[in-house]
């Protein structure tokens, strides 16, 4: 079971608090589902990945001259209107601790991918009610690095696709399918019907993940902060495994557990 107890502070809704306004005010968010209005994406890697993603509808770029040069040097084709702004004006568009690196992209949220978009997938990482956007963002980044096919979250008790999640993912949000499901137990059952082996991670699992049998298609399920994978989801998986730690602490933060689990899965599956 992963131990993800670190609290986080919601940074408030991103918006422009100065005299200038960006086009389209973000609408109220629906937890776990894509926002109903535009989102603000900031930071070099996040913005670069958003421009490279054919599924991302981009609206407007707010950037300094230096930031525009950096994007052009990296071969980014800017296909939206650009408003040149000073760094302090950009500061007022986002939360106080946001590191925008001189660029903020206003864009529509990504499509709401579902289980039907997983055709051909072999390695899927599912998060059962993991709520911290920093952790989910880090997991998305690790999933891309370890070449997973998708990250699945629940519609409720999951972070919205917003600025914090996108920044923590460092571009990964636009590089992997983020699938949202209403019921994680039902999703696991559907995947099993499609030939996937489903393994729930739990520190009290009967066998280590290394000693657990894998099929050629796998869903790894990691649990929420403190609670782990819920009982009904564990039962739907059928298989439960643990990550054996040689040190005094038996469990890992969920984002670290995700990295190790994906690595072990790739070795076991011969990917």
Image (spheres, rainbow, N blue to C red):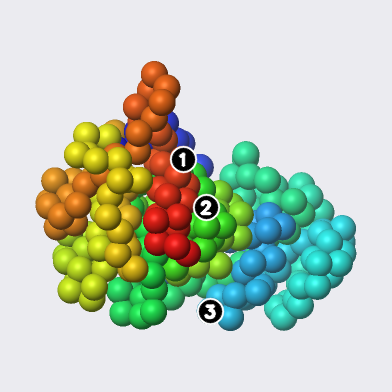
2 or 3: tag closer to the N-terminus: 3
Mark 3, other Cα within 10 Å: few <14 / some 14–19 / many ≥20:
few
Mark 2, other Cα within 10 Å: few <14 / some 14–19 / many ≥20:
many
Give the Cα separation between the discs numbered 2 and 3. 21 Å
Instruction: Label 3: state its secondary structure.
Output: loop
Tally of numbered tags: 3
Taking depth in this image into account, of 142 and 227 the one nearest to the observer is: 142
Residue at coordinates 32% horizontally, 74% vertically from top-left? 114
Q: Point out the image quarter for the N terminus.
A: top left
Taking depth in this image into account, of 46 and 151 the one nearest to the observer is: 151
Instruction: Label 1: state its secondary structure.
Output: helix
Left or right, 197 with respect to 173, comes to left
Taking depth in this image into account, of 265 and 213 the one nearest to the observer is: 213
Left or right, 90 with respect to 72, comes to left
From the image, state whether disc 1 or disc 3 is nearer to you.
Answer: 1
List the residue tagged with mark 1: 256
In percent of width and height, residue 31 lies at: 33, 56
Question: Residue 246's quadrant in the figure?
Answer: top left
List the residue tagged with mark 2: 142
Mark 1, other Cα within 10 Å: few <14 / some 14–19 / many ≥20:
some
Residue at coordinates 20% horizontally, 68% vertically from top-left? 192
List the residue tagged with mark 3: 55
2 or 1: tag closer to the N-terminus: 2
Are discs 2 and 1 less than 8 Å apart at CB? no
Give the Cα separation between the discs numbered 1 and 3. 29 Å
1 or 3: tag closer to the N-terminus: 3
In percent of width and height, residue 60 lies at: 67, 72
In percent of width and height, residue 36 lies at: 41, 69
Looking at the picture, does residue 195 appear above or below residue 9?
A: below
């Amino acid at each position: 079971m992963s131990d993800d107890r670190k609290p986080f502070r919601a940074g408030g809704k991103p918006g422009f608090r100065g005299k200038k306004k960006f086009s389209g005010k973000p609408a109220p968010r629906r937890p776990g589902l894509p926002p109903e209005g535009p989102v603000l994406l900031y930071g070099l890697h996040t913005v670069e990945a958003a421009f490279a993603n054919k599924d991302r509808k981009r609206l407007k770029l707010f950037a300094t001259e230096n930031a525009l040069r950096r994007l052009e040097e990296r071969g980014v084709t800017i296909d939206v209107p650009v408003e040149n702004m000073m760094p302090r004006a950009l500061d007022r568009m986002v939360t106080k601790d946001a590191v925008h690196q001189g660029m903020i992209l206003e864009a529509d949220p990504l499509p709401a991918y579902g289980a039907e978009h997983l055709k051909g997938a072999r390695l899927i990482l599912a998060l059962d009610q993991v709520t911290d956007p920093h952790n989910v963002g880090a997991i998305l980044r690790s999933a891309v690095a370890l070449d997973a096919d998708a990250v699945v979250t629940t519609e409720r008790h999951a972070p919205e696709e917003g600025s914090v999640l996108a920044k923590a993912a460092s571009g990964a949000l636009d590089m992997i399918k983020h699938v949202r499901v209403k019921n994680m137990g039902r999703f696991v059952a559907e995947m099993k019907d499609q030939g996937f082996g489903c393994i729930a991670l739990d520190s009290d699992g009967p066998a280590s993940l290394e000693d657990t049998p894998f099929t050629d298609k796998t869903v790894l399920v990691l649990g929420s902060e403190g609670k782990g994978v819920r009982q009904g989801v564990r039962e739907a998986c059928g298989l439960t495994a643990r990550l054996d730690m040689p040190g005094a602490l038996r469990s890992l933060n969920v984002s670290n557990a995700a990295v190790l689990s994906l690595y072990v899965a790739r070795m076991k599956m011969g990917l």
